Image (cartoon, grey):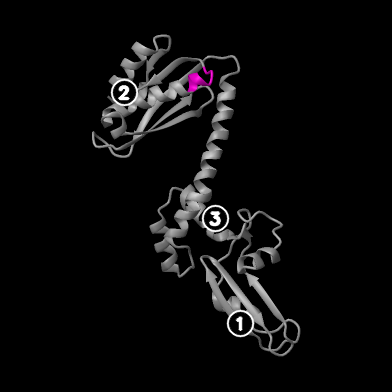
Amino acid sequence: MTDSSIYNESTVIATPPHIMRKFIVYEENLMDLFKNCPSCSRHCAIKSRTVGTVLHVDQTCVHCEHHKQWASQPYVKNIPAGNLQLAAAVLFCGSSFLQVTKFMQAFNIQGICHTTYLKHQRTFLFPTINWQWKQHQNTVIAEALKGRNVVLGGDMRADSPGHSAKYGTYSLMDLRANKIIDIQLIQSNEVGNSQRMEKEGSESSLRQLEQRGVTVRKTVTDRHPGVMKFLRESRPSILHRYDAWHMAKG
């Protein structure tokens, strides 16, 4: 039986770990709780170790043979809940793992290594994000299919300004529902150059929605030449309008 399974079995989680309140506890103050045996009140031998953010304590009384194993946090499928939640907090808040690590080191708080962070991203966090996005998109599309023509607003955000962008994210919003209905990730070398990314994103998004039965009545975009040409030649039935904010900006 592994150490993690021992602590996992001995910990009853009445409240989901991500909802539980957390506190900053100093090590010496915490160890004071284990110095004396709860059975005979004599001095105990204490061993401690950390696994990322979790502290394991083994308390042994040499007088009455009392023995206790304790973990500072619950486990979720043999993974310390704090390790997983720290990785999730960094990613979901759009923070930098390096900056968070510097903060924790300055405070001398135990944390996780970069390898663990990437592992949790790959194994748990990215699949969770994808699942949540699919649930959201299915709901928005289901609303769009309830007998009404859809008015969309589309625009692209690139990883850098100008003509040197490598990645772009094209988003379409259902303007009546005020919800994002589709997102496409475009890479410049897949479409020729960065100038073609916005047109490719618009085309891919509309194609995906049309394949799912969504009827687009009107779309609002900026005055990108590629998007204008695509809608004019390939989607003449869609009423194309320009975003007033982009026009005012020039």
Relative to 196, is 12 above or below? below
SS of the residue under disc 2: helix
Quarter in which the C terminus is drawn: top left
Q: Which residue is mark 1?
A: 46
Residue under label 2? 248
Amino acid type at circle 2 is Ala
Snapshot quadrant of residue 164 = top left
| Residue 125 part of the magenta segment | no
Could you tell me residue 9's position as x and y percent?
A: 69, 64
Give the extent of the magenta segment. Answer: 209-214
**Is 35 rendered above or below residue 9?**
below
Three-letter amino acid code at disc 1?
A: Ile
Q: Earlier in the sequence, mark 1 or mark 2?
A: 1
Q: Earlier in the sequence, mark 1 or mark 3?
A: 1
Which residue is found at the position 66% from the left and 54% from the top?
A: 16
Image height check: is 116 above or below 141?
below
